[in-house]
Amino acid sequence: MARALVAPSVLAVLIAGHLFFAFQLQSKRVDIVQQSEELRLFPPAAMKLLSLEYRDLVADLIFSRTMSFHGGVLKRGEKLDAPTWQAIYQRLDAVSQLDPYFVDPYYFGQAVLTWDAQMPREANALLDRGRRYRTEDWVMPFFMGFNAFYFLHDKPQGAAYLMEAAQRPRSPPLVGLLAARLSSESSGGETAIAFLQELEAKTDDQVAKEEIRKRIGALRGIWILERAVQDYRGRFGSAPADLSELVKRGVLGELPTDPYGGVFYLNNQGKVWTTSDLRPVT
Amino acid sequence: MTHLWPIAKITFLEGLRSRVFFGLFIVALLLFSSTYTLSYLFPRDVVKVAVDLGLGITSLIGLILTLFLGTQLLAKDLEQRTIHMVLAKAVSRSDYIVGKFAGLAMIIVCSMVVLGGFASVASWTVDRLTADQYGVIHWPIFLLALLMMTLMLMLLASVIFFFSSFASSTFLALGLTLVIYLIGQSVEELKHFLETGAEGVVISPVFLKIVTGAYYIFPNLAAFNFKAQAAHGLAVPLADVVWSFLYGVFYIGVMITSSAWIFRRREFS
């Protein structure tokens, strides 16, 4: 009878011991698991070799782990420091090297690297790969243009990216208008006008076509006036006090009109702009 | 040549009866059923992830299946000495090798049809349940990826046969084939990496020569990988497909002919 109880009691003791150690182990491993959240990363070239024919799946895996790491930090209400943001960027960069056509890391990078991490340069470096590989996708250069303009304060570069976005299939006409606006504010209006003329020719939608024509008209007005102001400076040695002087002193026959219903004027920096601000005046 | 078909048929039926076969199919079914949940963890490229998973699982299970069945089918005859009975029946040794390979190739094709079918259903389900902006499946490239995967597994099977024709143990043949698989999947990338170079890394010309040599000796298995093209619907030039296909067929031819040649000279105790 006693012998029959030996096996069950030994088993009971072992199970109790197992449970004790399992809990101990779990509490010991919390730190280790948290550390591994930081994910040591092989260099992308090594990962390409190691992932064999499962490169896309490895990209998916690293990306989903990066997302859940970021999500975990947000959930715990922690703030990420610069090295951690750098690590997230490296992860997204590695994912996009393993699978450069994969769209999610680009969107994720655009969402977190710019606003939260204050790393617009890195965001654009990442997006540039997307722009080169996803050649049919207007969103990649559009994001880059936005970052250049809004975060990096680089209007000419921003305009160049937006123009590229506008020339890609299925991009909304708004992108083209925005590109032209940035371009005319930063460089000469000529680029903007030439670009809009091309865009108008490609657009089928009549409403969009009309809108583009209006903007061409307004930008051409600004361009004519800027050249006249330059001409005036050359002839009289100083800038005109206001644009009406151009007509009075015979530099221009008449002042162009703004198709948006505004009035052209000379701003503080001596540049020509319009009271409509290139939007319809109501 | 008359004995070729019966041997192929017996090998095929023997393989189908193997427990490994059904065990792996059940694992595959479980993995495929996770496709839906896993792909929805991704915000945008949902269908791409579903196709990645579908094709990835198919090739992984196909690989395990080929490695195990391939080594088992030949080794069984040698270890259980049934080979003596077969060869005593006036079956030439080349017929035996080619017939066995044909049987194994049939098993691979059948498994890939079933696994590919599972993968298609899993990916199709995800595709149907998501809006088009989250991606669509490009079926012709999807099928092409499955076809090339099948050819790659046949090539690997021919490598198993090559090693089994002279290796004394099953594990040796399996181990060597595994090494060939690892080299074959990465040699192209390694060669490219060494040729283009990395900043601040000095590459010895001798090493580059060795890798270039390896590139021509070992099978370039990456040439059969069309999974990324299928997942993203990237254009596949017809020439790429034709060259990979012919490359695969000729490599298999070389492997099987050499196996038969070595096997003919082998002495059985």
Image (spheres, rainbow, N blue to C red):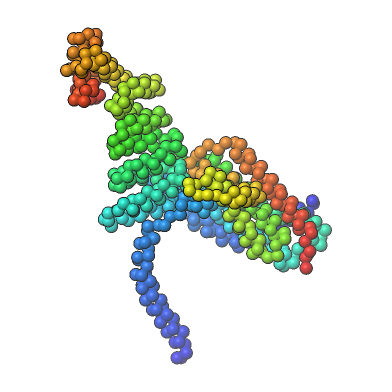
Q: Determine if residue B54 is in view.
A: no
Number of marks: 0
Outermost residue on the left side: it is A241
Depth order, front residue of B193/A35: B193
Q: Residue at x 29, y 35 (%)?
A: A153
Outermost residue on the bottom side: it is A2
Q: Residue at x 62, y 61 (%)?
A: B175
| Above or below, B169 relative to A218 | below
| Above or below, A72 relative to A207 | below
Q: Residue at x 54, y 40 (%)?
A: B141
Q: Residue at x 34, y 70 (%)?
A: A27
| Above or below, A28 relative to A223 | below
Measuring from the top left, give residue A39's x and y in whole percent: 40, 57
Outermost residue on the front side: it is A237
Measuring from the top left, give residue B64's x and y in whole percent: 58, 57
The quarter holding residue A78 reads: bottom left
Measuring from the top left, give residue A93's x and y in whole percent: 41, 47
Depth order, front residue of A230/A179: A230
Does residue A251 appear to the left or right of B223 in the view shown? left
Measuring from the top left, give residue B31's x and y in whole percent: 49, 56
Which quadrant would the C terminus of chain A be assigned to in this image?
top left
Q: Determine if residue B22 is in view.
A: yes
